[in-house]
Image: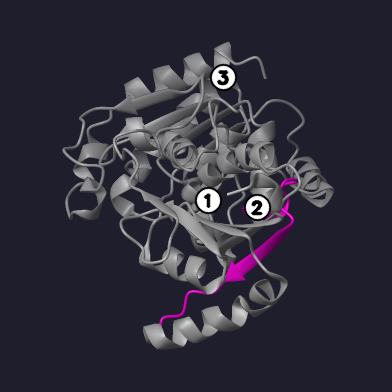
Amino acid sequence: MDRADVGRILLVKLTSLGDVIHGTAAIGPLHRAFPQAEITWAVDERFADVPRHHPGVTRVIEGKRLRAAPLHELRELSSTTATLRREGVDLAIDIQGTVRSAAWTYASGAPVKAGRGRFRPGWRRTLMPDLGRHAVQVIAEIMGGLGIPAPDPQPELHWPASADEAVSKFLAEHGVGGPFAVFNPFSRWPTKEWPIIRFQDLARRFHRDLAAPIIVTGGPAEASRAAAFAMAADPAEVIAAAGILDLPGLFCLLSRARLVVSVDSGPMHAAAAVGTPVVALFGPTLAERTGPWGRGHVVLQAERPDSQHAYRRPGSGALMGRLGLDAVYEAAARAWLESPG
């Protein structure tokens, strides 16, 4: 299609947090290919703050996942995209490749629809990327398959000044005036979590040897677990932030940390996207596909699983239990001492 005819683009990447963060790597290539175009991003309401503050995104449309019958969800989708259809979309790109994201792409009414997936009736182009590659490289491959060069894909996170103010206030209230580490022990999938007692032992040892304040992060659902973690580890020097800072505040906090120690999770990907060194603890997932993107990160994995989706199987959390405390401590201490932050 004539690039001069593309004035409005819909980018569809709905879930999850890490995937949406990876999806931001598509924004730069899209703007270079279509410099005059406005980009609208369709995303699950839980993760809308990822694209909302990106300077390359003009509008964010928040989707609400309904647990009712699919017909009800389609009605909700039609209502949500009514304005989009009225104003017109020239190009809709699905970079997720699910039935739900395809429904968003169809509902946009765009004359040109393309993206990830198998055959989609009425689409200009579909492709199945190499899923053996890292998720960020998959985004680049989707862009390249549509004729949009993405030679150096880089996820980007942005946040408003209010997030900086909230984080500054949070750190001041807890007496953190110098370098600090962030520990993220939680995942939506329990099989990805390192034994919590071992993580608490790591916090005690890390602070004792390196005199480093530690901030424990997580989502609102982990607020009580983060508070219990801090209390059990060292209430004086381990601070719980889960449920206190919102998503932009989390991104800002991670950007100020000297080091992040995390299981495979959205916050791990956020830390990598803002350029903070990460020590990532892996078990039932493949680090080459979902490890922290970029240079300067360390991945620890005692045993490689047979599949990226091994974490869905009961008992796969045993792979996390094979990571020893000494190995994690040594990697984290070395990363702390070598970090320029």
Counting labels gives 3
Local crowd size for mark 2, using a 10 Å CA cut-off: few (<14), some (14–19), many (≥20): many
Residue at image position (25%, 49%) is 311
Residue 76: x %, y % from top left? 53, 83
| Residue at 65% across, 52% down | 51
Query: Circle 2 is placed at which residue position?
Result: 51
Q: Is residue 98 above or below residue 240?
A: below
Of mark 1 and mark 3, the one earlier in the sequence is: 1
**Would residue 95 be found to the left or right of residue 32 on screen?**
left
Residue type of the residue flagged with mark 2 = Pro
Three-letter amino acid code of the residue under disc 1? Val
Quadrant position of residue 110:
bottom right
| Image point (65%, 14%), residue name | 340
Point out the frontmost of discs 2 and 3: 2
- Label 3: element kind: helix
Q: Where are the magenta residues, as a range?
A: 50-67
In which quadrant will I find the C terminus? top right
Q: Residue furthest front?
A: 2
Q: Is residue 234 visible?
A: no
Real-space CA distance between mark 2 and mark 1, rounded to the nearest whole angstrom: 8 Å
- Residue 249 to residue 134: above or below: below
Contact flag, marks 1 and 3 (Cβ < 8 Å): no
Residue 132, compared with residue 163, is above or below; it is above
Residue 304: give x, y in percent of width and height.
21, 31
* Mark 1 closeness class: few <14, some 14–19, many ≥20 residues within 10 Å: many
Tell me the mark number nearer the camera, choosing from 1 and 3: 1
Query: On the image, numbered disc 1 is attached to which residue?
Result: 20
Verify CB contact (< 8 Å) between mark 2 and mark 1. yes
Residue 63: image location, x then y, percent? 56, 71
- The residue pinned by badge 3 equals 210
Q: Is residue 95 left or right of residue 274?
A: left
